[in-house]
Image (cartoon, helix red, strand yellow):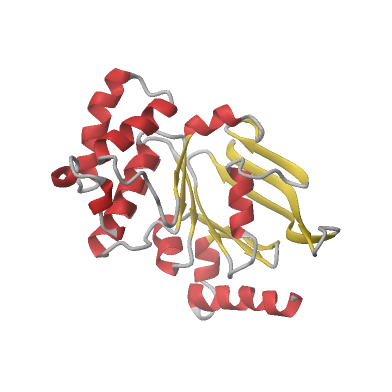
Amino acid sequence: MSAVLDLREVTKDYPAGAFGFRRLRAVDRASLIVGDGESVGLAGPNRAGKTTLLKMALSLCRPTSGQVTRLGRPGWDRSTLAGVGYVHEGPAFPAYLTASALLDEYAVMAGVAKADRRSRIPALIERVGLKDRQKEPIARFSKGMLQRLGLAQALVNHPRLLVLDEPNEGLDLPGRDLVVELVKEHRERGGSVLIVSHLLTDLDRLCDRVTVIVAGQVSFDGPVAELAGQPGGLEASLRALYRRQGERS
């Protein structure tokens, strides 16, 4: 299976101390791979290094060492980001825009042709349940509506890789079901998914495989079913892995 995202033995050090002479190691020789057509979860306790891994995956920062490959190209090649859809855990958009205008701007930046934008944007707005609010300014949107709009924004370019950071944040039960449906539809089109989540239901319902990072290092990388099948189930398995963070601190 070819990889759409491959972070191989990456390390990230940040300057620390009053003058930045010391180094704080956020990620230590960690690997994160998302195969073509695969759905992978990224889990770990707070301050484990998940956000830093995600930043390196999206070219928001460069690794101190190691290699990043995205869509078959080196991580520094930002043109590959046109093939990525990303939903932040707390999406923030220009409040004066409407949903339609926002999606059109993102589609233009991703190089989506005008004819495709005309058909794709109304269909996406309806798919995420915002058809009746598409002409209202985003300033009037609730947190759940913003999350739905974020999902539409991430899918507007038909990405090969969909990255969801806490996708169920602020969503009600129908909204959470929508996330499951959208992930399933994306994968049926041949797309891959990376999901960062603290919710066990996200990992269980949405992911084939999970990478668990603890204290900057990968503690587990394998099928979700392998963790879920251990005594105590998925929650007990993750608790045991997370406990190592305190031991390393």
Q: Position of residue 35 (x, y in %)?
A: 56, 42
Q: Position of residue 60 (x, y in %)?
A: 61, 44
**7 lies above or below 23:** above
Q: Position of residue 239 (x, y in %)?
A: 57, 77
Q: Would you say 4 lies left or right of 111 here?
A: right
**Which residue shows up at 61% across the image and 40% down it?**
59
**Which residue shows up at 27% across the image and 47% down it?**
138
Q: Nearer the viewer, residue 137 or 202?
A: 137
- The C terminus is located in which quarter? bottom right
**106 lies above or below 113:** below
- The N terminus is located in which quarter? top right
**117 lies above or below 2:** above
Q: Nearer the viewer, residue 195 or 33?
A: 195
**201 lies above or below 42:** below
Q: Nearer the viewer, residue 154 or 146?
A: 146
Q: Residue furthest right?
A: 21
Q: Would you say 77 lies left or right of 110 here?
A: right
**Which residue shows up at 51% across the image and 62% down it?**
224
Q: Is residue 194 visible?
A: yes
Q: Position of residue 231 (x, y in %)?
A: 54, 80
**Which residue shows up at 44% across the image and 67% down it?**
199
Residue 126 occupies quadrant: top left
Q: Is residue 188 visible?
A: no
Total labels drawn: 0
Q: Would you say 130 lies left or right of 194 here?
A: left
Residue 219 occupies quadrant: bottom right
